[in-house]
Image (cartoon, rainbow, N blue to C red):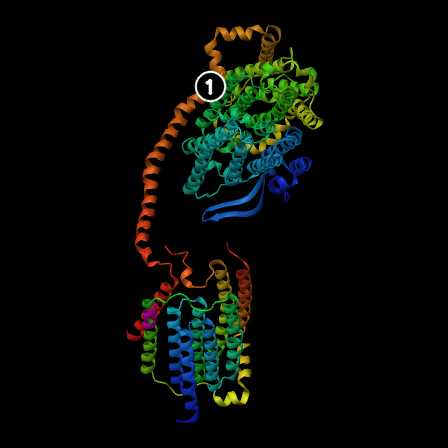
Amino acid sequence: MDISSVFFALVTVVAVISALMVVLCKNPINSALSLVLTFFCIATYYAMLNAPFMAAVQIIVYAGAIMVLIVFTIMLLNIRVDANKKSTHQVALGSVIGIVTLLLAGIFLSRGKVSAPVGDITNAVINNTGHTELIGKVMFTDFLLPFEITSILLLVAIIGAVILAKRKLS
Amino acid sequence: MFDNVWLIPLFPLIGFLINGLLGKKIKNETVIGSIGSLAVFASFVVSVITFLKLIGLPADERSVNVKIFSWITAGNFNADVAFLIDPLSCIMLLVVTGISTVIHIYSIGYMHGEEGFYRFFAYLNLFVFSMLLLVSGNNLLLMFVGWEGVGLCSYLLIGYYFHKKSASDAGKKAFVMNRVGDFGFLLGAFTLFWWLGQNHGVWTIQFTELAKNANLFPTGGVVTVITLCFFLGATGKSAQIPLYTWLPDAMEGPTPVSALIHAATMVTAGVYMIGRMSFLFIRSPETMMTVAVVGGCTALFAATIGTAQNDIKRVLAYSTVSQLGYMFLAMGVGAFTAGIFHLMTHAFFKACLFLGSGAVIHSMHHALHHIHSHDDAQDMRNMGGLSKKMPLTYMTFLAATIAIAGIPGFSGFFSKDEILWQAFANPLHGGLNTLLWLFGACAALLTAFYMFRLVFMTFHGTCRIKSGAEKHLHESPMVIVIPLLILAFFSVFGGYLGIPKLIGDVFGGIPNYMEHFLAPVFANANEYIHAHTHHGHHSHALEWGLMALSVVIALVGISVAYMLYMVNTDIPKKFTQAFPGLHRAVFNKWYIDELYDFAIVNPCKALGRLLWKGFDVLVVDGIVNGVASIVMSFGGVIRYFQTGLIYNYAWTMAFGVVVIVGYYMFK
Amino acid sequence: MDNLSSYLIVSAVLFSIGTIGVLTRKNAIVIFMCVELMLNAVNLTFVAFSRHLGNLDGQIFVFFIMTVAAAEAAVGLAMFIAFFNNRGSIDIDDASTMKW
């Protein structure tokens, strides 16, 4: 067992526990903070996968922007504790579905066989050229049109958010 | 050469669009009226230019198709938006645009202050546009577009005062009656197209092409069917027996509309159509006979009704029906030129009469309104002695009346006398000729009588308007009087375009311009007449004699009217008392409306009610409601799945995903 | 560490936890956070496969998913605020206008 495996296991423990905390905490603020921790773990995974740009984006966009927005909303609406009682049969049903999902994924994984790594973008290439540059090249050549369309999506989202939050239905 | 012909219908269309779409915003009556009038005047100018160009061509080349664009092409069927410029359409263009211009100008004064002023002008322009399309289209389909267009516009304009029930009813009546005729037109067009294509491989609806292939048609047989269908269309549009009853009711519209419908547009469409299809009509003796007889009967029949009406516009309306009868009589006896000529002269004097009566009504209405009286402003019994109050209107009205009565020297004389002579002398109908002539002559007598009755009752004698109102009667403004003067001028002198050869020879061989000009159009039909009939020769003495006789008839009619309504005014009353049944029948228009109601309208209504109560309510509604209730009960069952709770939906969705993924994994 | 299977297992576990959260919690914001968690689990799969297959397309995809998530966050949170303004809570049980 090499050091990286140990580190992986450690991160995984943190990730799973914090993910469970997201679901189990009564206070939404706690859930949100646990989610931030999960996001950091995932960013760590990205770094371990030799995808430093994705790790950075993960932290900036998710842990930074989106989570700030969520926390901000929670505080703005002054939501403290999940006051409503959970209906037990709903929890049971949800858990069953979740566990069945996990089982399905497990069966899927156990059936498959992992091939040897293929493709041009090997660790060597990434280390020589730099991950960000590689991503940038692909993004602005092959994926230029989707990239531009994304900007329109964001614009629409901004306008939509403004309209929705501004209007007071009565 | 005729590249800008398309401008003729375009101008009124533009006027219609501007006034129709923006009129409500413009509001200014002068601007709206000017736009409407200018649009029609512009197309009049283009028509005149076209006419001059046409005159410049040699007589046998005066038939030009101007294609604007291909409209419909489907298999063998071709319809272009194209105009046919020939003497006939040119005369129609001039008459329609010329008279419409005058009427438009008149309307500015007449409709002053009316609600929906812009609407009126928009409709008028659309009306003129449709009519121009009708007379200038070079194929049956384009003609039919105009044909339907004038029907629609007549509905809109007759029902202009739509808040008045009688007006909207009259509009509907006109529309429905016209639709009956249109149906005939369509059947005729279909049969014509199909028969010619099926039997001779000539698939065309173009007039010039049809005329070129006229020799393919047999005499009688299918041609009779086709032409009778077309003739049904013509009776609807031109108010002939049996479809004439809408025209008198069209009086509900504003007076300029009546003038437009009666003089320049709409009713002349049927006559024009027969003229345009003369090469076909002439090939069916039965149809020609029908046209002549229907025309003669209508002329006489409508004239009898005209003698007993008290509403000034109603008298004129029956007079129009009667005069249209003359035109059809002319068409039916193969005197196409005479028919078109009468159409033209009639357009002048009838427009003048209607606009004159409009001026009278306007003035009467104004005066009665002043003293807050609710007397009928159109009832001649309330008028009398107006000649002193409205001298210019009186003069123009009198000129037009003399013209319609057929006094020599005035336009009506030339055209009417030509028709009567042709009715007598034509080679088509043999023994029936005398009868046709007699019908025409009797109608002429009655025409002279009732027209002068109208003049005497309206303009002469003592003023019978409610006391106090007479000092408010006065001449109309210039915008109304000037159109009257223009029309009166043409009513008097318009006839000199078609002086009969007989009279022309006396005055040193003045040619009959009308006949020469129109000759190429009717060449085909006339050749056929010459080839297939025995042309009996009639002496000049006979023609002179009949001419003198018709003048005498007119004079008799006038003097009788003078006797009854100027000298001895008790006689009409006594006559009415002596023959109450006859008077009542004539006054009530021979109960034709009631007959139609009884025989056609009410059975149709009953059938409609039956279908409504029986079929619609039970079957159609039953099916619809049945489907709805089935859906509802089904929905009542499955709505239990729609809990409205979000987590139920989420749960169902997740469950579905798991099931599908599981299925693919284990299959 | 380049072992594909371990990343996929972690991803599956996180995804299942997210699913359970979505299905069991009633606070709309918490549900929203669980959806984000599921999205991140999928992102992890994408990146892991992308690295394993030596192709950058998967990472580009992740990038787009993040964009969509950002847009979703903006609109979704705005909706929550609007909903809260109307109902005084963000409990999804209160979104019951459609309930028969």
- Mark 1 lies on residue: B432
Is residue B109 or residue B225 the one in the foreground? B109
Q: Chain of mark 1?
A: B
Is residue B604 or residue B97 the one in the foreground? B604
Location of residue B39 in the rendering, given as x and y in whole percent from the top left corner: 65, 38
Q: With respect to residue A149, does B521 lie above or below? A: above
Q: Residue at x 51, y 87 (%)?
A: A126
The magenta segment is A90-96
Q: Position of A109 compared to B123: left or right?
A: left
Is residue B97 or residue B342 the one in the foreground? B97
Q: Position of C18 compared to B350: left or right?
A: left
Location of residue B608 in the rendering, given as x and y in whole percent from the top left corner: 38, 32
Q: With respect to residue B447, does C78 lie above or below? A: below
The answer to whether any part of residue B21 appears in the image is yes
Q: Amino acid at mark 1?
A: Leu
Q: Residue furthest bottom?
A: A2
